[in-house]
Image (cartoon, rainbow, N blue to C red):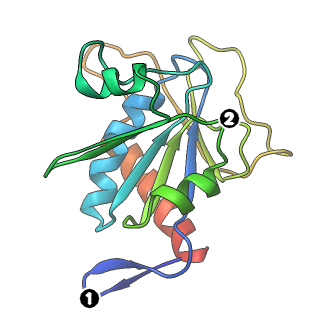
Amino acid sequence: MLLFLEGRWKKIGSIPIISIVGKSNSGKTLFIEKLIPELKEAGLKVGTIKHDVHGFDIDRPGKDTWRHKQAGANLVLISSPYKIALIKDVEQDSKLDKLQEEYISDVDLILTEGYKSGDKPKIEVFRPARHEEKLCQPEEDEILTTVINKEKEEGEEIFSSAEIKGVVKIILDFVAGS
């Protein structure tokens, strides 16, 4: 739970997690890109977790960290005065609560992109021009809201600032009540 004290949201207990879900190419990343600055303007420190069921590789061939991993390191951590990155072998997909517990401690809210089958509250991004039906099922998922991604028309903004501000209010109400 967060409390707004001394001009900013303060965490009490575990960090709330909300999953931004939707079918492929629904606009989840664009929505998150527009949502984060508004949440930060509301005073929240926001962390994100991207779920990739296909696997990924963030390291580039030839770089020192890539060479360490290729040599057989089970864990590679790179640190600078500006950021830290961790590459670690795992034997199975991690649950959100475990990721939060082990790696994230200094944010007020965690947004995930993905984890559609997870047990966290969800905001679905639905793009009717590309998909016939929504991903989430109200009887199975805790859905905070659904954002409709309409095809962009001349002069029309996808995910208007009014829509984003409405979702921010829903998120702040949820977080305050959790």
Helix, strand or loop at mark 1: loop
Q: Position of residue 112 (x, y in %)?
A: 52, 44
Q: Evaluate if marks 1 and 2 touch, with contact meaning CB atoms under 8 Å apart.
A: no
Badge 1 amino acid:
Glu
Q: Decide which of 36, 114 is in the foreground and name it.
A: 114
Q: What residue would you read off at disc 1?
A: 6
Q: Residue lying at the far front in this picture: please name it.
A: 71
Identity of the residue drawn at 64% across and 14% down? 131
Question: Pointer 2: residues within 10 angstroms few (<14), some, or many (20+)?
Answer: few
Q: Position of residue 105 (x, y in %)?
A: 43, 66
- The span from disc 1 to disc 2 (Cα, nearest Å) is 43 Å
Q: Decide which of 72, 41 is in the foreground and name it.
A: 72
Q: Decide which of 36, 167 is in the foreground and name it.
A: 36
Identity of the residue drawn at 58% across and 11% down? 130
Give the answer, above or below, for where 167 lies relative to 44.
above
Q: Residue lying at the far right in this picture: please name it.
A: 139
Give the answer, above or below, for where 40 lies relative to 3.
above
Q: How many marks?
A: 2
Q: Residue lying at the far left in this picture: please name it.
A: 81
- Quarter of the image holding residue 178? bottom right
Q: Position of residue 114 (x, y in %)?
A: 58, 35
Judged by depth in the image, the label closer to the viewer, 1 or 2, is 2
Q: What residue would you read off at disc 2?
A: 91
Question: Pointer 1: residues within 10 angstroms few (<14), some, or many (20+)?
Answer: few
The tag earlier along the polypeptide, 1 or 2, is: 1
Badge 2 amino acid:
Glu
Give the answer, above or below, for where 83 lies relative to 156.
below
Identity of the residue drawn at 66% across and 36% down? 93
